Amino acid sequence: MLNTDVFVNIGINHYLGLSAILFVLGLMGVLLRRNAIVILMSIELMLNAVNLTFVAFSRYTHRIDGQIIVFFVMTIAAAEAAVGLALMVSIYKRFKEVNIRFFEHLKG
Amino acid sequence: MISDALLFWFLAFVTVGSGLAVVLFTNPIYSALSLVMTMVGVSALFVTLGAYFIAGVQLIVYAGAVMVLFVMVLMLFDLKQELMAFSRGQITGALKVISAGLFLGLIFGIITKRSNLSFVDKIPSPADINIDNSKELGTVLFARHIFGFEALGVLLLVIAVGTVALARSKGGTHAKH
């Protein structure tokens, strides 16, 4: 008989596995895509995966500090998105495209 | 118990599927909308973990503010379907996918083999879930992590000024002086 325990009893390892999958999806987005905005979105995906890990461990250890760190991570992510999108706007003004290859002209 | 498991697997399916869609769609608007779906799924996962306040903040900050910012910038650019959405080299692309897969396998190996985390956490009983979650969160944030909180305030001020300065600069990065 098939052991269905893994599928029925949801523990911390399930959450950790799910967040690892999400993190690697974001990593592949960063590595494979050329559009800089999609790269920013993939970074947001990775940060979300990390947040999921923090909350899972906070629940597991019954300590609230993990959720505090999630606050900090969310703030940093919002700030990073704002700065990244401002960079995109100035790249787009010059090159009319937001492909990542134009970032090598950012010097000066 | 079964309903908890079903809910988890459903949410896992939704988040992984929409996360995959973020990477695979060539139209950036579709990617942004899939990312909204992922954010909502992660927020629901926070609810299943008993972090209600964080779930609300996730919905407001990510699905509300950050994604609206993304979609607005995308509409400003008026990007069409991209021709070169993915990086070109086949071999390097395969190497990237393989290394990301190895990384995933490494994490899974660490989680399942080396951890002495009990595989089955207790199902949250009503006494187990902290009802005053937000109250305790506020107490800890303003008592133990007050320095980080203030530093974040300074950071947000710097970011606000810097973003406006970056976006207003005439001629982008190649301004003629």
Image (cartoon, coloured by chain):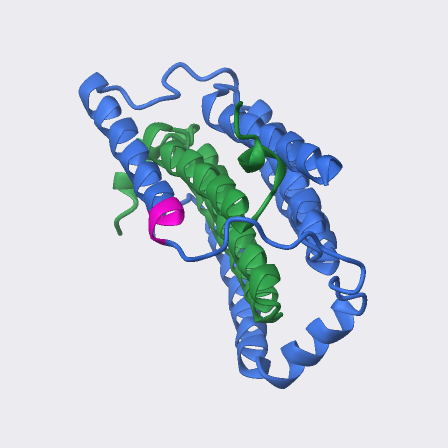
> Is residue A89 among what the camera can see?
no
Quarter of the rendering occupied by the N terminus of chain B: top right
Q: Against B10, is B4 above or below?
A: below
The region drawn magenta spans B110-114
Question: What residue lies at 27% left-to-right and 35% top-to-bottom?
Answer: B102
Question: What residue lies at 57% left-to-right and 60% top-to-bottom?
Answer: A60
Within the image, what quadrant is residue A4 found in?
top right
Indicate yes or no whether the magenta region holds residue B113: yes
Image colour for chain A is green
Whether residue B37 sits left or right of residue A73 in the image: it is right
| Chain letter tied to blue | B
Question: What residue lies at 60% left-to-right and 70% top-to-bottom?
Answer: A63
Within the image, what quadrant is residue B140 found in?
bottom right
- Across and down, in percent, residue A92 comes to 45, 35
**Residue situated in front as seen by the camera: A3 or A6:** A3
- Across and down, in percent, residue B176 comes to 34, 47
Residue at the farthest front position = A1
Whether residue B25 sits left or right of residue B47 in the image: it is left
Prevalent SS, magenta region: helix
> Is residue A8 among what the camera can see?
yes
Question: What residue lies at 26% left-to-right and 49% top-to-bottom?
Answer: A107
